[in-house]
Structures are given as C-alpha cells and as structure tokens.
Amino acid sequence: MPDKHPAELHHSYKYYDLLLGAFVTVLLCSNLIGPGKSCVLNLGVNIVPDYTKDHGFAFTSLLVFGAGNIFFPISYIFGDCLTEVYGYARSRRVIWAGFGAMIFATIMSWVVRHLPANPGEEYNKTIVPALDVVFGNTGRIVIASIIAFWVGDFANSFVMAKMKILTGGKHLWTRTVGSTFVGQGIDSMLFYPIAFASIWEPSTLIKVSIFNWLFKVAVEVLMTPLTYAICNFLKRAEGVDFFDRNTNFTPFSLKDE
C-alpha cells in the first residue's frame, strides 16, 4: 500500500470522523460511568497483588477493579489505529478533541450538581444524591485524570509512529503493545500519585499503579487480533498507510500534517 505524502492528506476520509467520535465516546464513558462501580472477580488462583498488606507482595484470588478499567484501554486501541493508518498529526487532533470533551464534561457535571434542585419534584430526592456519588469526584482526581490522559495518549501515539518507521511498517503487534506499555505506564504513574499521594500508603500507591498499568496492557494484548482487523480494514478502505517521516511531533498543534 502506498506511503502517503503529507500533501495528499487533505482528501476526504470515509471513517476518520467515525473513529474520532468513537474515541471520544469511549473516553467520556470510561471516565464518567466507569468510576461509578467497583467490581470484584474471583479468579480461583492467588495471582492478584493484595493491596491490604502493608509490607511485601502478598497475593489473593480476588481481582478488584474499577469498571472503567475494562473499557478505557479501548481508547488506546482506537488511538493505535488512528496513528497506524492516518498518522500522528491526525491522531493528535483526536487527542485534543478528547481533551476538550473531558474538560467540558467536567464543567457540565460540576454545574449540574451545584444547581439548586427543585424540592417539588419527588424524584430529586433519589437522583440528586446519586449524581453526587457518580459525578462527584474530587477536583484532585479530575485533574489527575485529565493530565494522565493527555500525556499518556500523546506518548502512546508518538511511540506508535516512531516504531512504525523503525519496523518498516511490519509487526504491528510490537507497536500496539509497545506503545500501550509506554502510554499506559505514563498514565498510571501520573494518575495515581497525583490523585492519591498522601492519601494512600506509598506501598499501596505503587502496587495499585503497577497492577492497573499491567491490567490495561493485558487488555490491549487480548485485543490485538481486533486491532489488526480494524487497521487492515481501514488501510484498504481509505487507501492510505501513513509513515510519519516528516511529521512535526509537537503536541501543541492542530495541523493535520
């Protein structure tokens, strides 16, 4: 498949806008709906780090995780496909769209929760406390989430683009797993310390950060066949397989080249 020059990038794509919308949807749902429920799964074998132990690494069979951790890595799959097919610059625009959507959602949730409720509506007695629980994340957690997303996603896209050049476009799995390993690592190592330092014990902070990092990478590994299928389909449908040889990798731009 031909390697497109930046000058050829300005034609209309069939699926780029759909991927942008899907990326933002997954991102918002993972951050707004996902944190609303903590889940537990008994794996039947003691392979999960036990965070309740203050010293050392003990293990348990109970996997406890936020529901959003299942779906948030999907945004990295979309990010991988966007960078692989359309290039870093197009992926950069999508990341900024997601960043803007998160800022707007944060502001909207704050405004909705702080508007005075109508005491004459009976359902407000149920819905208002529920809104506070689901959308009432502290400012520190919100800031941590936004910073970690922005830095982690740009790192993911940068590594993906650079590895594509190094591998000559071959061995897609090395790029998807490698970029996610870096991106999710940065995401986890930023989010948990910013959100919970001085609240959690340092040992717990380290264990949770490492486990959630590896958990998200594992989801990416399991989704590798789907990533292959999506990328191959898009390359055929769009007639493009972009290499970022002359790309300006600054994150502070909305240019598509």
Image (cartoon, rainbow, N blue to C red):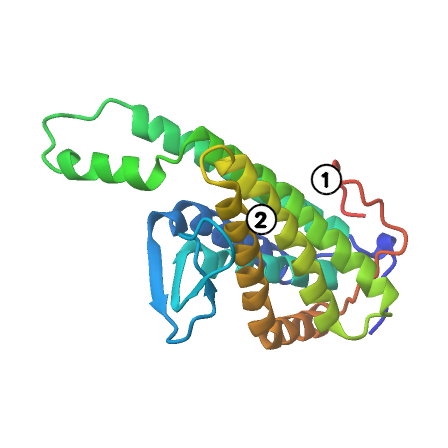
* Residue 38 in sight here: yes
Give the alpha-carbon distance from disc 2 to disc 1, as whole Å.
26 Å
Q: Is residue 42 left or right of residue 59?
A: left
Residue 68 in which image quadrant: bottom left
As rendered, which of 155 and 95 lies closer to the eye? Answer: 155
Residue at x 58%, y 48% (from the top left corner): 188
Dot 2 or dot 1: first in sequence order is: 2
Q: Which residue is mark 1?
A: 254
* Residue 104 in sight here: no
Residue 9 in which image quadrant: bottom right
As rendered, which of 212 and 173 lies closer to the eye? Answer: 212
- Counting labels gives 2
The quadrant of the rendering that contains the N terminus is bottom right
Q: Is residue 156 left or right of residue 118?
A: right
As rendered, which of 2 and 125 lies closer to the eye? Answer: 125
User: In front of the other: label 2 or label 1?
Assistant: 2
Percent x, y for residue 147? 59, 37
Q: Secondary structure at mark 2?
A: helix
Q: Which residue is mark 2?
A: 188
> Residue placed farthest to the top in the image?
116
Amino acid tagged 1? Leu
Amino acid tagged 2? Ser
Percent x, y for residue 88? 76, 52
Q: Secondary structure at mark 1?
A: loop
Q: Is residue 110 left or right of residue 94?
A: left
As rendered, which of 77 and 214 lies closer to the eye? Answer: 214
Mark 2 surroundings within 10 Å by alpha-carbon count, few (fewer than 14), some (14 through 19), many (20 or more): many
Residue at x 76%, y 70% (from the top left corner): 239
Percent x, y for residue 93? 68, 45
Q: Is residue 13 left or right of residue 27?
A: right
